[in-house]
Image (cartoon, rainbow, N blue to C red):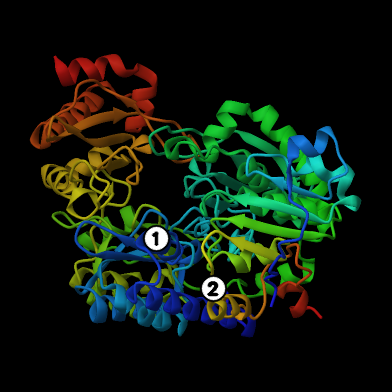
Amino acid sequence: MVEHLHSDGEEPCVTLDAFLNQSNATAVRLESDEDARALIPYLDRLKLIEVAFPKFRDGRGYSSARILREAGYAGELRAQGDVLVDQIAYMKRCGFDSFAPEKPLDPADVEAALTRWPEHYQTAADGAVPIWKLRHG
Amino acid sequence: MYKYDEYDHAMVAARVAEFSDQVRRRLAGEITEDQFKPLRLMNGLYLQLHAYMLRVAVPYGTLDSRQMRMLAHIARKYDRDYGHFTTRQNIQYNWIKLEDAPAILEDLASVEMHAIQTSGNCIRNISSDQWAGAAADEITDPRPWAELLRQWSSFHPEFSYLPRKFKIAVIAADEDRAAMRLHDIGIQIVEKDGQHGAAFYVGGGMGRTPMIAPLIKDFVPLEDMLSYAEACLRVYNRYGRRDNIYKARIKILIHELGADEYRRQVEEEWAHVKSLGIDPPKAEFDRIAAQFAPPALDASAPDEIDRSDPDFAVWVDQNVAKHKMPGHAIVNISLKPVGGIPGDASSAQIDLMADLAEKYSHDELRVTHAQNIVLPHVRKADLYAIWQALDAAGLATPNLDLISDIIACPGLDYCSLANARSIPVAQKIAARFSDLGRQKELGELKLKISGCINACGHHHAGHIGILGVDRKGTENYQLLLGGSGAEDVSLGTITGPGFDEDGIVDAIERVTDKYLAERAEGERFVDTYRRVGMAPFKEAIYG
């Protein structure tokens, strides 16, 4: 089970602008039109990056997540907003490890979605071994 | 032909299970139509005017007889006994019930087929040259690369919620039979210093803002093809417009940035992406390529054709193309009989074409973007028997690339987006020019009809294009001249005020009469148009 339930006690996320202008914050929120690469110099002190999905059709957050993971970010990467059960398997592959959907998801549906795919055709940010590598040992 | 291994089977089975579950949740009211829509679209299911339409993927247009028979079976069991072959080398069914969709996808999976990503804002079915592996002018078979791209793009986690749909074509000949430069990415396999590489053309497309793709990189090493594509897509996913559906295709991004700036961003992204281990090793390409090995063709097969039957000879001259192997030929089956619906075939016709492929064409068929079917590997000695069988089934219309070989979208007869009907216009034009001698006199003339500005009927790329619009509540047809989707790619120009349904047919006749009066020796219609320009045609049309 990947979905983390975040506690009330956690540090609130600051905006990207606020983060870049100060700060000792360890949690930042990235809107869908903001450049994930702006965070790259600070990844080792960040504990949480929340990526906004204002609408489920807005797929920019998938690229943001991969860019952050490809740059070595190892902290919590959270998808927040219009996050639907039918998107979370792809989100996980792009490096998200927690989900804060606006509307609660059915846990059984989440479980089914995350265990549905036996393998994957392509390399992504989840460390899964792609099918072409499995084929050739 | 590519055969699924255990992994491919498992992936398609997982998709069928996933979609069955999504349909169940939709029918139970657990998800809204708004939430269901992108899911069904990514499984090829559209809601049209009268019913659901299911679009089945035919990767790079290649099929075997078993798959072709399954397409007939689906038409018979779940639809109204026919299917419609499309400009994406796919087939679609117009009268599908939502509750039948999971069963259809299971039937398809049993013959290594699916409807994955035939719609939605994701990477669509990869298209290619319908003569791949048979054409005398190709430098290699492009389909192994198309298959590699198919697997890479299937369920791509980063690129399934793009700003808009994304179409990729791969060819490997200078003659472009796939409208390559009218794709979001067009790839041509080229040769340089004895090495093959991929030329990437990015940002082409039709729709309401047609654009010809500029060359973004002239030679990508083939082992880097996927990472380069990934870089192209990532720049688009991040920066493509999402504020306006009509400006969301990659062509608009590249137009607004300029090709040079887009290229710079892709190069920067590629420098990073290339290091991520996205490109499979050569062993994987070799595994795929081995499955596209040329069929065992008899190089000593007789090269002569007995032309004593004159009707047969007419068909051979028009519909049979040169194969790379002596004694063999490529058969093009026209799905454009006079009075028919372009691209439609009945279950019985689909079965017959499957039988002919199995018996005479090394079990292979192709779907073309011009909505016809190809038997790619036929012995010349078998042509007469094939023609007789086709003729008996109404499939021997000898009109390949002539004025009645019309591309037409489904139009207002089916489509909820259309402004005007396309099919009756196509039928009237075919009837007006039904005399074959007259068609042959006009020579190669590619006529393409769209029932709205979304341009599914490729009207921008027609030597003669027709665009149906809604004008104060009545159907009106604009006429375009001078487009091409081939290697001489160009976009058509509107002649002037539009016409009603009969008026457009008259206007086309005036245009073709003018061509016959103006043409120089050896000129096709489009050559004459390019030489003399619009003015003489405009004069002929409007007086």
Please give the label number shown on residue B37.
1
3D distance between C-alphas at marks 2 and 1 = 55 Å
Determine the chain carrying the residue at label 2: B
The local crowd at label 2, few if under 14, some if 14 to 19, many if 20 or more residues have their Cα within 10 Å, is few
Q: Residue drawn 35% across and 46% down?
A: B456
In the rendered image, the residue lying farthest to the left is B502
Is B238 situated above or below B339?
A: above
Percent position (x, y) of residue A130?
A: 73, 72
Is B242 situated above or below A57?
A: above
In front here: A49 or B195? A49
Determine the chain carrying the residue at label 1: B
Where disc 2 sits, the SS reads: loop
Q: Residue drawn 62% across and 48% down?
A: A60
Disc nearer the start of the sequence (2/1): 1
Percent position (x, y) of residue B357?
A: 39, 76
Percent position (x, y) of residue B238?
A: 64, 43
Quadrant the C terminus of chain B occupies: top left
From the image, state whether disc 2 or disc 1 is nearer to you: 1
Is B38 situated above or below B206?
A: below
Q: Can I make out residue B112 in this image?
A: no
Q: Residue drawn 67% across and 51% down?
A: A51
Q: Amino acid at mark 1?
A: Lys
To the question of a shared chain for discs 2 and 1, the answer is: yes
Quadrant the N terminus of chain B occupies: bottom right
Q: Can I make out residue B186 in this image?
A: yes
Where disc 1 sits, the SS reads: helix
Q: What residue did someone put label 2 on?
A: B300
